[in-house]
């Protein structure tokens, strides 16, 4: 490997190098936050199986407008911003799997962290969120 050529490339293209390093840092951060979120990711099929076999609870953490545009039937709606204050509403579901969901599966990892801090052990993140749920042609309610 010719380090002189790498140094020359770096000197001529600092914007590309900064963009690459920024993207790499963001990727590492997102992956680390996913791993340490306290929630295991499950796809729509696994989520459906958890619901059918173990009576899982779907927790929709999206804002009101997003929720009313279409949500998983029977999902409990607690916006992410309100979850720390309203986590007690989930106490009666403590023994059941809780599947947190958002639009794309990114914000629901934060919900998993909050629930894990409050002692919930069976917390899952719906990978791909409602978008993946709809892509799998699973039911959505607007009621």
Image: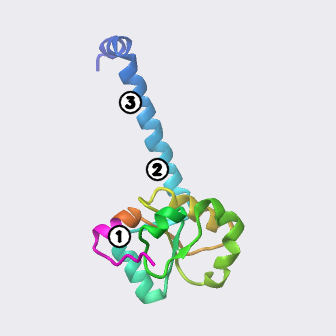
Instruction: Say which residue appears at 55% left-offset and 75% top-offset.
Output: 122
Q: Is residue 19 above or below residue 115?
A: above
- Left or right: 57 as drawn, with respect to 20: right
- Point out which mark residue 20 bears: 3
**Quick check: marks 2 and 3 in contact, CB under 8 Å?**
no
**Residue 17 on image: x %, y %:** 39, 23
Badge 2 is on which residue?
A: 31
**For marks 1 and 2 on the same chain, the one whose residue lies earlier in the sequence:** 2
**For marks 2 and 3 on the same chain, the one whose residue lies earlier in the sequence:** 3
Q: Main secondary structure of the magenta part?
A: loop
* The image quarter in which residue 116 lies: bottom right
* Magenta span contains residue 23: no
Q: CA distance from mark 1 to mark 3?
A: 32 Å
Say which quadrant the N terminus sits in.
top left
- Point out which mark residue 29 bears: none
* The image quarter in which residue 112 lies: bottom right
Instruction: Say which residue appears at 36% left-offset and 72% top-offset.
Output: 44
Badge 1 is on which residue?
A: 133
**For marks 1 and 3 on the same chain, the one whose residue lies earlier in the sequence:** 3
Magenta range is 132-143
Tell which of 24 and 44 is nearer to you.
44
Secondary structure type for disc 1: helix
Secondary structure type for disc 3: helix
**Residue 83 on image: x %, y %:** 64, 65
Tell which of 47 and 32 is nearer to you.
47
């Amino acid at each position: 490997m010719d380090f002189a050529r790498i140094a020359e490339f770096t000197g001529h293209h600092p914007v590309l190098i900064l963009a690459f390093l920024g993207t790499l840092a963001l990727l590492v951060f997102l992956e680390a936050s996913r791993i340490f979120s306290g929630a295991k990711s499950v796809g729509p099929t696994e989520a459906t199986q958890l619901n059918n076999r173990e009576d899982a609870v779907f927790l929709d953490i999206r804002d009101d407008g997003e929720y009313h545009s279409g949500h998983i039937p029977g999902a409990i709606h607690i916006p992410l911003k309100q979850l720390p204050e309203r986590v007690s509403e989930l106490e009666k579901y403590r023994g059941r799997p809780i599947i947190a969901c958002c639009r794309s599966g990114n914000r629901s990892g934060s919900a998993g962290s909050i629930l894990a801090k409050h002692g919930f052990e069976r917390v899952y993140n719906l990978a791909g969120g409602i978008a993946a749920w709809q892509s799998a042609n699973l039911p959505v309610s607007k009621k």
